[in-house]
Amino acid sequence: MARADYPEPVVELIAELKRLPGIGPRSAERVAVWLLQNPKSNAAELAEATLKAKHEVDSCDVCGFFSSHGRCPVCSDEHRDASELCVVEQATDVLPLERSGVFKGYYHCMGGKLSPLDNVTPENLRITPLIKRVEANPGVEVILALGADVEGEATANYLAEVLSTRECRVTRIAQGLPAGGGLDHADELTLMRALQGRRQIEH
Amino acid sequence: MARADYPEPVVELIAELKRLPGIGPRSAERVAVWLLQNPKSNAAELAEATLKAKHEVDSCDVCGFFSSHGRCPVCSDEHRDASELCVVEQATDVLPLERSGVFKGYYHCMGGKLSPLDNVTPENLRITPLIKRVEANPGVEVILALGADVEGEATANYLAEVLSTRECRVTRIAQGLPAGGGLDHADELTLMRALQGRRQIEH
């Protein structure tokens, strides 16, 4: 007597779902069964949305953000402030900045951060397109909005070095205490950065 | 200036992913971006596996477990013990029992449990097919392997009542301390059931 298992197509679906990030074997099984059994599920719509997104969505040639037809919505918006260019690591970093609503300029996604251990060297990042954009827009402020980890720091330093010979102003977003965070929860490095970045209170 | 968001196909994909059980807005976004950007992802394979499973997988006419062509692998296995029929709530309950490897008989999935608050009455469960199977196999042991919650109890009591006039033996799986669980973590009801179900140690 063989132990019964799910039919082959279900086993295959579970295997595909398990490869998704953050989905373990249990969740994969739960999602697969839900797709097959729940009357509210629409497996066909999920499959179609997946294929459609994969086919239609591309990277913007200019900034590297997601775009569905040619230029991305940011680069094709002429009402933005061309004097500010915000450099981020990944296309996904654009969204939190957009949602905050505080930045009105354009973006440049590097496509990663320098990480010699993972074989990510300057050649793997979109540095040449960045230099071209800066040269085409003299006097622009390049705001480095990279992560506050070691690789983010290294990338910021490298970019600052490369851009130092170009006609632009390079700034970097502040590091310090996160909103809502108390001193008791902050680590030493965060406190050090917060102290280093202290500013005069204007009266 | 409009705040930029993901292109429409990505928004749609995120919406579809968010409907899956256990997937919140953050995970949906993460999975969508992974499907689009990760070189190891294969969106087409996921879409295909979803459609294939949905098209090919059905319920076994006999027991209600998953089947891909007619009868399920359990019901078409003639080497099983026909003297034992294990009644479970859902098709998914068969797998843990199969994986434990201790049960050699056949199954019957009720398709739910009695729950008047959710409008699940005896008519919504696969009770008539169960009675037919019992009548076709006189003397069978019907093992009620239903959940240890209120609805599971109610369903077990109802089934025991219905089957009492048929030629069969009705048993119920034990309730008690879970494997690896200490007394200090067990709730009062579990301890009560564990005490009630105590058995003589054989010498």
Image (cartoon, coloured by chain):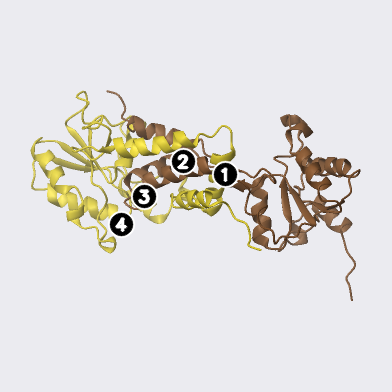
Chain colours: A yellow, B brown
Circle 1 packing at 10 Å, graded few (<14), some (14-19), many (20+), is: many
Quarter of the image with the C terminus of chain A in it: top left
Disc 3 target residue: B41
Q: Quadrant of residue A79?
A: top left
Disc 1 target residue: A33
| Contact between labelled residues 3 and 4, with CB atoms less than 8 Å apart | no
Query: Residue A162, position in %: x, y?
Result: 13, 50
Q: Quadrant of residue A168?
A: top left
| Contact between labelled residues 1 and 4, with CB atoms less than 8 Å apart | no
| Contact between labelled residues 1 and 2, with CB atoms less than 8 Å apart | no
Disc 4 target residue: A150
Q: Are marks 2 and 3 on the same chain?
A: yes
| Contact between labelled residues 1 and 3, with CB atoms less than 8 Å apart | no
Q: Are marks 3 and 1 on the same chain?
A: no
Chain for mark 3?
B
- Give residue A51's mark: none
Question: Which numbered disc, 4 or 1, marks the residue closer to the eye?
Answer: 1
Asked whether residue B121 appears in the rendered view, the answer is no
Q: Are marks 4 and 3 on the same chain?
A: no
Q: Is residue B37 left or right of residue B23?
A: left
> In what element is the residue under mark 4?
helix
- Gap between marks 4 and 3 measured at Cα: 27 Å
Three-letter amino acid code at the position of disc 2: Leu
The residue shown at (19%, 47%) is A126
Chain for mark 2?
B
Quarter of the image with the N terminus of chain A in it: bottom right
> In what element is the residue under mark 1?
helix
- Gap between marks 2 and 4 measured at Cα: 44 Å
